[in-house]
Image: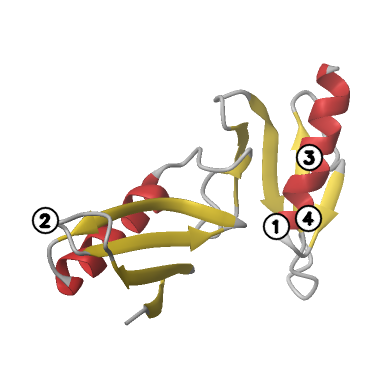
Amino acid sequence: MPYYREYRGFEVHLEDSTEYDQLPFVWRVVGFGGERSFGAAPSRHEAYFAARASIDHIQSDPFRFPINLLGYPDQSGGEVVTRDGEVLGHWRLSGDESLKLVEFIPLGASEALFRDHFIGLLCESISDWHEGKVS
């Protein structure tokens, strides 16, 4: 019988398996647009905790996205770094708390190039800018 639960913003899917004789339960972690990891375990309980451990590992990687805002959301600013470790600039929360905007300031600049309420859209703008700059 299939099982589904959310953990730390990811989906954990457990299914009975006929593929693995010794490991009858398959787990899959889905999030951010696709399957992030999978495996098999001897029991449903072990499969669930293996999936959670995988999510914890994914979440602990500071360079897990193409564009990463280091320190977000725990800090009020930090570096903006690509998955490859290239520093593109820094981010900060806007001065107006009521707007809740996050701003991107490229290396060597003093003013924000992009600002947005939504981190995904901000990172997409930064990525498009970076790809145009690199091409």
Residue 116 percent coordinates (x, y): 81, 58
Q: Quadrant of residue 5?
A: bottom left
| Label 1 CA crowd tier, 10 Å (few <14, some 14–19, many 20+) | some
User: Closer to the N terminus: mark 3 or mark 2?
Assistant: 2
Residue located beneath label 2 in the image: 22
What residue sits 62% from the left and 57% below the top? 33
Q: Residues within 10 Å of mark 4 (few under 14, many from 20)?
A: few
How far apart marks 3 and 1 lie (CA) works out to 10 Å
From this viewpoint, is residue 109 visible?
no
> Element type at marker 2?
loop
Tell me the quadrant of the picture where the C terminus can be found: top right
Q: Is residue 85 left or right of residue 93?
A: left
Name the residue type under label 1: Ile
Q: Amino acid at mark 2?
A: Gln
Question: Is 86 on the left or on the right of 19, as rendered?
Answer: right
The reply to whether the C-beta atoms of the residues labelled 4 and 3 are less than 8 Å apart is no
| 94 or 56, nearer to the observer | 56
Residue 119 position, x and y percent, is 70, 57
**Separation of residues labelled 1 and 4 (CA atoms):** 5 Å
Q: Residue at x 78, y 23 (%)?
A: 108
Q: CB atoms at circles 1 and 2 under 8 Å apart? A: no
Which mark is on residue 126?
3
Q: Earlier in the sequence, mark 4 or mark 3?
A: 4
Q: Which residue is mark 1?
A: 119
Q: Position of residue 75 (x, y in %)?
A: 53, 55
Question: Could you say whether the residue bearing mark 3 is in a helix, strand or loop?
Answer: helix
First along the sequence among labels 1 and 2: 2
Is residue 89 placed above or below 59 in the rendered structure? above
Task: Kindly identify the amino acid type of the residue bearing the numbered disc 3.
Answer: Ile
Q: Is residue 125 above or below residue 39?
A: above
Residue underneath mark 4 = 121
Q: Identify the image's colour scheme: rainbow, by chain, secondary structure or one colour.
A: secondary structure
